[in-house]
Image (tube, rainbow, N blue to C red):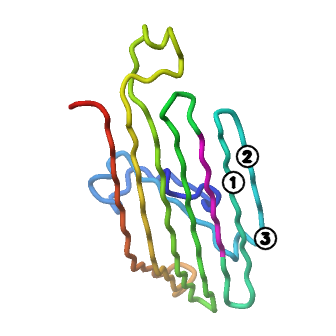
């Protein structure tokens, strides 16, 4: 979830009891609908800041002209963390290039992201009583990187029938550094 730009999400649906999602979805499945240039025209910018060195910003732009549409969302930020040795940062992007004519709708999607979450483990109460920012062991950091390229299409055969298809490639890489001896 930390690799998906929240600003690019149009809708999230919880689908329960549907065998179409496979045996691993016994409790249900979440379906994310992402924005396109046709359904999210215009631009928006957001900048936030807060305690412990928190700084976050996002930019999105969408538009359509004739059969073509384009949407781009980029966000990122960082914070120092309220405990020593616990900084976190993230950078994410999502782009959709669409073509819609008649009953045919095609979308080329490119997305990527990277996070580095510096989360230190439990600290004994007696050490925290001396300094609330104290840590017992470090470093503890998880670095995630992902990339996605997808081509999605749909064809509306009639008011009752439509056909959809997707072809995609996805890459994910994770590194974890743990200062605990285990």
Eyeballing the image, is 106 above or below 120?
A: below
At numbered mark 1, what does the secondary structure look like: helix, strand or loop?
strand
- Identify the residue at image location x=45%, y=76%: 149
Q: Main secondary structure of the magenta part?
A: strand
The spot of residue 30 in percent (x, y) is 46, 53
> In which image quadrant can residue 170 be found?
bottom left
For residue 138, side relative to residue 103 (left or right): left
Question: Residue 176 in magenta?
Answer: no
The answer to whether the residues at label 1 and label 3 have Cβ atoms under 8 Å apart is: no
Magenta stretch bounds: 71-79
Give the CA distance from mark 2 to mark 3: 20 Å
The answer to whether the residues at label 2 and label 1 have Cβ atoms under 8 Å apart is: yes
The residue that label 1 is drawn on is 57
Disc nearest the viewer among 2 and 3: 2
Disc nearest the viewer among 1 and 3: 1
- Identify the residue at image location x=60%, y=41%: 79
Eyeballing the image, is 128 above or below 139?
A: above
User: In front here: 78 or 58?
Assistant: 78
The residue that label 3 is drawn on is 42
- Identify the residue at image location x=28%, y=52%: 24
Q: Residues within 10 Å of mark 3 (few under 14, many from 20)?
A: few
Name the disc covering residue 48, or none. 2
Question: Residue 76 in magenta?
Answer: yes
């Amino acid at each position: 979830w930390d690799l998906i730009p929240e600003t690019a999400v149009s809708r999230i649906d919880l689908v329960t009891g549907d065998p179409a999602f496979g045996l691993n979805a016994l409790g249900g499945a979440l379906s994310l609908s992402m924005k396109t240039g046709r359904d999210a025209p215009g631009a928006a910018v957001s900048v936030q800041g807060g305690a412990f060195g928190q700084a976050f910003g996002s930019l999105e732009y969408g538009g359509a002209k004739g059969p073509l549409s384009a949407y781009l969302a980029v966000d990122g930020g960082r914070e120092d963390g309220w405990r020593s040795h616990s900084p976190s940062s993230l950078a994410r992007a999502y782009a959709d290039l669409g073509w819609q004519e008649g009953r045919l709708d095609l979308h080329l999607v490119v997305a990527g992201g990277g996070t580095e979450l510096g989360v230190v483990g439990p600290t004994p109460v007696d050490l925290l009583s001396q300094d609330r920012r104290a840590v017992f062991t470090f470093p503890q950091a998880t670095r995630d990187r992902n990339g996605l390229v997808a081509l999605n299409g749909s064809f509306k055969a009639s008011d009752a029938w439509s056909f959809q298809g997707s072809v995609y490639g996805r890459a994910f890489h994770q590194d974890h550094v743990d200062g605990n001896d285990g």
